[in-house]
Amino acid sequence: MMDAAVRIFGQRGYRAASMDDIAELAGVSKPLVYLYLNSKEELFGACIRREAAALVDAVRDGVSAAGGDSADRQLWAGLRAFFGHTAERPDGWAVLHGQARTQGEPFAAEVAAMRAEVVAFVTSLVVAAAREAHGDPSLPEREVAGLAQALVGAAESMADWAGADASVSAREAAATLMNFAWVGLGGMLEGRGWVSA
Amino acid sequence: MMDAAVRIFGQRGYRAASMDDIAELAGVSKPLVYLYLNSKEELFGACIRREAAALVDAVRDGVSAAGGDSADRQLWAGLRAFFGHTAERPDGWAVLHGQARTQGEPFAAEVAAMRAEVVAFVTSLVVAAAREAHGDPSLPEREVAGLAQALVGAAESMADWAGADASVSAREAAATLMNFAWVGLGGMLEGRGWVSA
Amino acid sequence: MMDAAVRIFGQRGYRAASMDDIAELAGVSKPLVYLYLNSKEELFGACIRREAAALVDAVRDGVSAAGGDSADRQLWAGLRAFFGHTAERPDGWAVLHGQARTQGEPFAAEVAAMRAEVVAFVTSLVVAAAREAHGDPSLPEREVAGLAQALVGAAESMADWAGADASVSAREAAATLMNFAWVGLGGMLEGRGWVSA
Amino acid sequence: MMDAAVRIFGQRGYRAASMDDIAELAGVSKPLVYLYLNSKEELFGACIRREAAALVDAVRDGVSAAGGDSADRQLWAGLRAFFGHTAERPDGWAVLHGQARTQGEPFAAEVAAMRAEVVAFVTSLVVAAAREAHGDPSLPEREVAGLAQALVGAAESMADWAGADASVSAREAAATLMNFAWVGLGGMLEGRGWVSA
DNA sequence: AATGAATGAGCTTTCATTCAT
DNA sequence: GATGAATGAAAGCTCATTCAT
């Protein structure tokens, strides 16, 4: 039932999705949907929370598996987990990235807060990398915040891209982004790459 | 009149925006809106096209001004123009990035196509940079496509970020992204940077 | 179970009362309610009939106890019984007077018919009183009908009033109405009263 | 439009009345009803207030016309106006007496308050009559309150009765009630009557 | 050129009612 | 004997859209 809701919400958006459509896709009657989840808004909230939790858990698990490794290795693990998850659950990703972020809809603030947490986590990774590199956070705090936004945005965009083209594997997407993020275009053009680093 | 529409659409989204609100904000009567733009869908389309054209023009002008320069210089010029424009027209940017991309809404395909053009342009810049570096497109075409997606996504995300924090100037956002894109986190942590390149 | 129904119907009215609420207050499941009383309408009908019968019985018993007395004494007995009963069963009275009389609801006609019987009984009392006074029904039939309506309406109104103010005893309400009905305002103002008659 | 609403509300009650029915009877579309009166509740409130004001105005005008007369003459004038009005506007009377008083519906409290004002006015008439009779309020305040309730209830009941039987004129109903209220059943049976008083 | 007035269609939500167990 | 689970039908309300002026 929530799978149906996630799919419909992901495809149509919160406003355009009708409870009739969701109930029909779920193969149940509308009142049943209301019996379990009391309103459209609550249903949407439940979808968002479920998908967000699944995504965050997947990434956290990936990062945790790279436990004591260096910051770049942790980032690499997180990216693989992220692209793997978004590829596996395209509807969930569509709800989170494609719909819930839409301003004005309910839970937009909540979703923004969850994204902010992700950005904060990435920020901490960057700071850790800086420490590992030369013992101090050489980059100004403000710039690190911008870099984290850039990295997260890049990942989101690539998730959409990889999701639309089935031939792009999660690992490939993660590798491309990791190279980009670590050595930049300049480094890549010089033949360097993160993996070799 | 279209300014009002852009603002309302940007704040509320296509479905949640009501023609009453738009007409009221524009200070005209609803039938007048229908006289000029025949339906909500057409009105939305007109908004999207206007804002997309304005954004593309701004970026193109910025890049053109860096006419014969190297590819990285052209990218730098484009980024400055991009962040400058999104900061100046937050409503327009909200419509383009925050709403029109929502799947299921009319024109989502059209907006996706326009974004694809931007990605293609960035791709050509990357290819040009590769040529400048050592005469051949050393990176596989497929990887270049991914890099362009990453770069565009990073820029979009930073535009939202810079738009939400008035203290971040367009130049600062552009500089941060340019460094990130060119030398990567690794390079930045080693003290390198694009500007110095 | 019917107690619960009477209370809910009395407080909310037929339409606003929900079968869920009734079942919950009764502490049973909804299908059980349907097992015993087949529909909302029948349940309401059963409530009405039960309460109407209880009220009519109470008044009849009161009047019967004043068996061979004069008509005014019988009226006095009936009024005491009436106010005593409505005070004891406020929910039942609320259903009968406050809800079931509402036009358009099922059983409105039935309730009206029961009320008409009461009016007819009061009419017969008035006629009997006339016979006792001077051997013939001195008042035109039509006027007697109106008087009975007035008397019943006065009693209903006072039942609501006494029900809302716990300090008003059934006996006090009955006495006030009896005086009013027998000697009228004029008589009361002249210091006369029914009891002294 | 409000006439239609008054009729439907009067016949079916607040809950059972549907906005579709009201709109259809009014010969307009549902949204138009919502354009003028924003919700079902507001529409009902407007009906109640309009009918209550009309009734109160009618009675007040009747009483005022009997300006400096004695209290019983004022009561007589008020009763005639009351029965005249309820006969002329049966739908309005049905809404006020038959529906709006139903517990639990919106505005029940408001309607109860208006009725309380009427009772207070009748109370003042009774007190005035007592003063005219022998200079002091010989009846206990508490009893006067009960008498006013009885009188108002009698009038309400007779209005329903007279409304259901077209052959009963407003004047006749008023005369019957006036006699009843002034000399009581006892007095009427002795051949006395208010008019002769 | 511009609008007040009006509506068809659709959405969310509720509720009396019924099975399968 | 009793119920958890499920639904058909309807109601309140909104909105894009049009016409007569």
Image (tube, coloured by chain):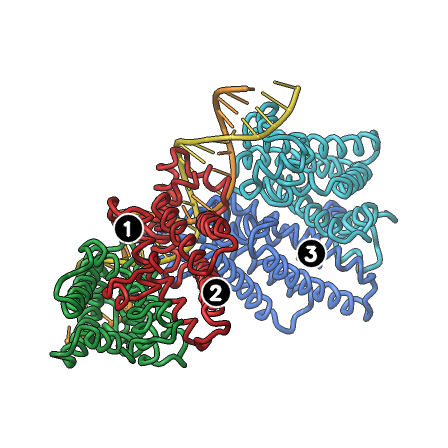
Chain colours: A blue, B cyan, C green, D red, E yellow, F orange
Q: Residue at x 52, y 55 (%)?
A: D68
Horizontal and vertical percent for residue D62? Answer: 46, 49
Horizontal and vertical percent for residue A193? Answer: 70, 53
Mark sitting earlier along the chain (2/1): 2
The image's mark for residue D162 is 1
Q: Which of labels 1 and 3 is toward the front?
A: 1
* Chain under callout 3: A
Q: Are marks 3 and 2 on the same chain?
A: no
Q: Residue at x 19, y 55 (%)?
A: C140
Q: CA distance from mark 1 to mark 3?
A: 97 Å
Q: Are marks 2 and 1 on the same chain?
A: yes
What amino acid is at disc 2? Ala
Q: Which of labels 3 and 2 is toward the front?
A: 2
Q: Which residue is mark 3?
A: A194
- Residue sitting nearer the eye, D87 or B170: D87
Does dot 2 land on a helix, a strand or a loop?
helix
